[in-house]
Amino acid sequence: MVLRFKQVLDPYMKLSRGLINKEKSQVFGWHCNDTTLQQIYQEIKIHVELGWSPFKYMAIPISLVVSNKSRWTKILQIYQK
């Protein structure tokens, strides 16, 4: 599993000439066991989350629960600037 993870990540970084900010990145393991996530961490040194937790993607909150309208209003205001 760790090898497959790197087989996707490494070519992406090489082709895009981009770097991953490891301090801001996380790997979420929704369908992944704890051992595999720990192996991914050991190999690439990116923080892993052992299960589901709310997070933000490009300032947009991602969660299992639908956010209320006031929360989305603030986010839309950011992108309208």
Image (tube, helix red, strand yellow):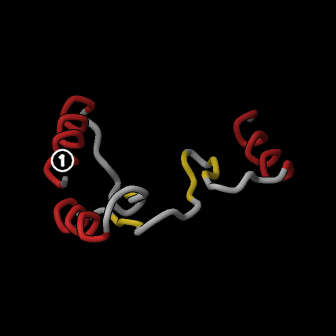
The one of 17 and 65 positioned closer to us in this rendering: 65
As displayed, is residue 74 above or below residue 28? above
Task: Give the residue at the far right of this rendering.
Answer: 70
Category of crowding for the residue at label 1, using alpha-carbon neighbours closer than 10 angstroms: few (below 14), some (14–19), many (at least 20): some
- For the residue labelled by badge 1, is the local secondary structure a helix, a strand or a loop? helix
Residue 22, position as x, y percentages in the image: 33, 59
The one of 68 and 16 positioned closer to us in this rendering: 68
Q: Which residue is mark 1?
A: 6
Identity, as a three-letter code, of the amino acid under mark 1: Lys
The residue depicted at 43 percent of the width and 57 percent of the height is: 30
The one of 15 and 7 positioned closer to us in this rendering: 7
From the viewer's perspective, is 45 left or right of 29? left
Task: Give the residue at the far top of this rendering.
Answer: 15
Task: Tell me if I can see residue 70 in this picture.
Answer: yes
As displayed, is residue 17 above or below residue 21? above
Residue 49, position as x, y percentages in the image: 41, 67
The residue depicted at 82 percent of the width and 45 percent of the height is: 73
Where does the C terminus fall, quadrant-wise?
top right
